[in-house]
Image: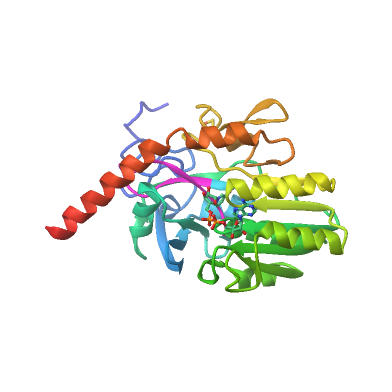
Amino acid sequence: MAPPGKTGAMNRGTNKDAGDWITGHNHSCRLQHAVARSSFRFRVLRKRRLAANVVRMAIHAPLVAANAKPGQFMLLRPGEHSERIPLTISNADLAEGTVTIVFQESGVTTRELAKLKRGDYVHDLAGPLGTPSEIAEFGTVACVGGGVGIAVMLPIARALRQAGNRVVGIIGARTRELVLLEKDMREACDDVLVMTDDGSYGGKGLVTDALAELIAREPVHRAYAIGPLPMMFFVCKLTKEHGIKTIVSLDPVMVDGTGMCGGCRVLVGGEAKFTCVDGPEFDGHLVDWDTLKARKAIYKDEEQFALQAALEREGKDAEA
Ligand code: NAD
Ligand code: FES
């Protein structure tokens, strides 16, 4: 066998444009000789702002697109010095070789990602990661999506309907402008109920209000809930009273995404689970929500500090 770095397509540095699809740039990869160079470069093909701070982005990543299933996520870094963040795959287009993500610009890294323009490259990207959603025929399924969680719900709702379920989408946002992907959800589901907190569009109230009405109206055999933690908690509280099994998608802090660092640990049914490999979906009636809430808040101060520093840097750059 040739010594590292001497010969062959697998050696580090022999192909300056290509890279490992796991780590991005000029690292060696066993697949490198077998797939096209372009497979290792993650070009932004489309970018659209869906709401004031919500962006949809289609990224060329054919190997990920070919293997992605509903419920799975990717870890990516927008730039060389960025943090690695998990984002659930909202759509995978096999023919085009793209994966689509929808994200909220809420911290330093999502702001960096949102700055990438069409034609730019995401520095590195790993995926698909996590256990896919359990898709089977359950009967009537309520797919409850809150805010940005609607984008994560979309492929799951689509797959559940393809599996023969009657799928009722319940989507909620604070106000009309923040209702995302309603048209896509209407195409994916048999019926869609829209709720806004302020009543500016659809029904006035929370997604849990619409879910309670649906449960009163017809038998619901399974529920999925994806959105902010309090929303998932209250959906589970309601469905538990009615004995409806409910799957939630959790988004704790992640570091490696492969089950090694323990950063994404959650308690489910009294057992420690790693969200990145055992999840991100779990039985919501078994999730220890208090522990999850506490763990999600651990880095709040540091995140706020980093965001403040980034905003100040941006302000100085704009002045210069
Ligand atoms: P948001 O706070 O605007 O809430 C969206 C909707 O969720 C509300 O309109 C309401 O209908 C419902 N909701 C919120 N709180 C509720 C409560 N206490 N009881 C019942 N229903 C409630 O949503 P946002 O700002 O778009 O959400 C952002 C959050 O979503 C982020 O913090 C992120 O962590 C989370 N998120 C999670 C996932 C995931 O995979 N779990 C994916 C995307 C986003
Ligand atoms: Fe490290 Fe899950 S992110 S174990």
| 30 vs 118, nearest the viewer | 118
Residue appearing at x 51%, y 30% in the figure: 263
Residue 215, x across and y down, in percent: 82, 58
Toward which corner of the image does residue 84 lie, by quadrant? top left
Q: Is residue 151 left or right of residue 219?
A: left
Please say whether residue 28 is visible from this viewpoint: no
| 55 vs 116, nearest the viewer | 55
| 121 vs 169, nearest the viewer | 169
Q: Which residues are magenta?
A: 74-91
Q: Examine the rendered structure and indicate whether residue 272 appears above or below residue 32.
A: above
Q: Is residue 211 left or right of residue 7?
A: right
Q: Examine the rendered structure and indicate whether residue 282 appears above or below residue 53.
A: above
Is residue 79 on the magenta stretch? yes
Please say whether residue 219 is visible from this viewpoint: yes
Q: How many marks?
A: 0
| 155 vs 97, nearest the viewer | 155
Residue appearing at x 56%, y 55% in the figure: 65
Instruction: Name the quarter where the C terminus is drawn.
Output: bottom left
Q: Examine the rendered structure and indicate whether residue 96 appears above or below residue 183.
A: above
Q: Examine the rendered structure and indicate whether residue 87 appears above or below residue 58.
A: above
Is residue 179 on the magenta stretch? no
Residue appearing at x 33%, y 48% in the figure: 79
Instruction: Name the quarter where the N terminus is drawn.
Output: top left
Residue appearing at x 77%, y 69% in the figure: 190
Residue 206, x across and y down, in percent: 65, 60
- Judged from this view, the residue extending furthest toward the left is 320
Q: Is residue 116 left or right of residue 158?
A: left
Toward which corner of the image does residue 149 lie, by quadrant? bottom right
Look at the image and name its color scheme: rainbow
Residue 182, x across and y down, in percent: 61, 70
